[in-house]
Image (cartoon, grey):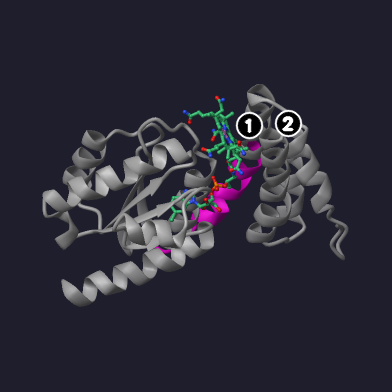
Amino acid sequence: MTTPDGFDFDALAQAVIDGQAETAGDLTRRALDAGIAPADILERGLIAGMRVVGVRFRDNIIFVPEVLIAARAMKAGMAHLEPILAACGIEPIGTVVIGTVKGDIHDIGKNLVGMMLRGAGFRVVDLGVNVALPKFLAAIDEHQPQIVGMSALLTTTMGQMKTNIDAFRERGLDRRLRVMVGGAPVSEEYARTIGADGYGKDASSAVQRAQALLDELKAVRP
Ligand code: B12
């Protein structure tokens, strides 16, 4: 699809699908220069491309190396969006510690959520991927976040989120922080089942939920 000002979202999606990092970066830059909203570039270009990659991967049409190359192209585009999404006010409205849980190395979605949270005024401490419980606990101790975000993309690693939430609760941390979870296999219902306080199906709903949780926490602990 082409916008009235001539930007072709399909070409950007295709660059991700083909793993053309340079083209994905150039097209993202061009879209920004044409005044297209970062959220549209993300959703209709970069994420649209990665969606196709996901289907082809699932159907065994492509394999891990191709997916990695596509992920690199997506990141090349995201690198141009990050400073814009992150540009915000001065004082952070709250702190979020975020990471992909132990056993899982998917980080594209988590990075997007982190970027959008920064854009909404949060300080974001990103622990990276394959984050084991002790690392979450140490970061909570060090950064005193109001919110902890956990990402899991595999059905085999989703359970780790519950293990972590249980451990936070055992330590009484649920009195002073709220937990948000997300990732492709995670649902609102699953989040509720494991005792998470919030779920985000995508980065913008993650931001809305984080803002609501922060307000809720401030009402309880002003
Ligand atoms: C890219 C990718 C990879 C890349 C990851 C590169 C990277 N740097 O992240 C590579 C090639 C490394 C990879 C490896 C593997 N992958 Co993979 N991968 C994918 C793929 C195609 C896309 C994921 C992605 O980036 N999506 C785009 C982002 C924007 O979406 P997202 O991650 O869902 O994030 C959004 C939301 O979920 C939400 N969100 C995400 N995190 C959070 C956190 C919080 C707090 C909140 C509120 C919201 C939130 O907001 C995000 C932004 O909108 C998916 C397919 C899919 N449909 O998800 C498979 C997929 C997840 N992978 C899969 C598999 C099986 C694997 C491997 C086991 C393959 C293998 N045989 O080795 C390994 C596992 C490695 C490991 N230990 O983690 C399966 C999982 C199946 C299952 N049921 O568990 C999938 C579903 C593919 C499939 N259909 O089979 N993979």
Q: Quadrant of the C terminus?
A: bottom left
Q: Which residues are magenta?
A: 76-91
The three-letter code of the residue at mark 2 reads: Gly
* N-term mark: 1 or 2: 2
- Residue 48 highlighted magenta (yes or no): no
Residue at point 19% right, 49% down? 168
Can residue 110 be seen? yes
Which numbered marker is on residue 19?
2
The local crowd at label 2, few if under 14, some if 14 to 19, many if 20 or more residues have their Cα within 10 Å, is many
Kindly state the secondary structure of the residue where label 1 is placed: helix
Residue at point 85% right, 57% down? 1
Up-down: is 107 above or below 172?
Answer: above
Coordinates of residue 108 in the picture (x, y in percent) = 54, 41
Residue at point 39% right, 53% down? 181
Q: Which residue is mark 1?
A: 72
- Residue 90 highlighted magenta (yes or no): yes
List the single residue furthest toward the top: 65
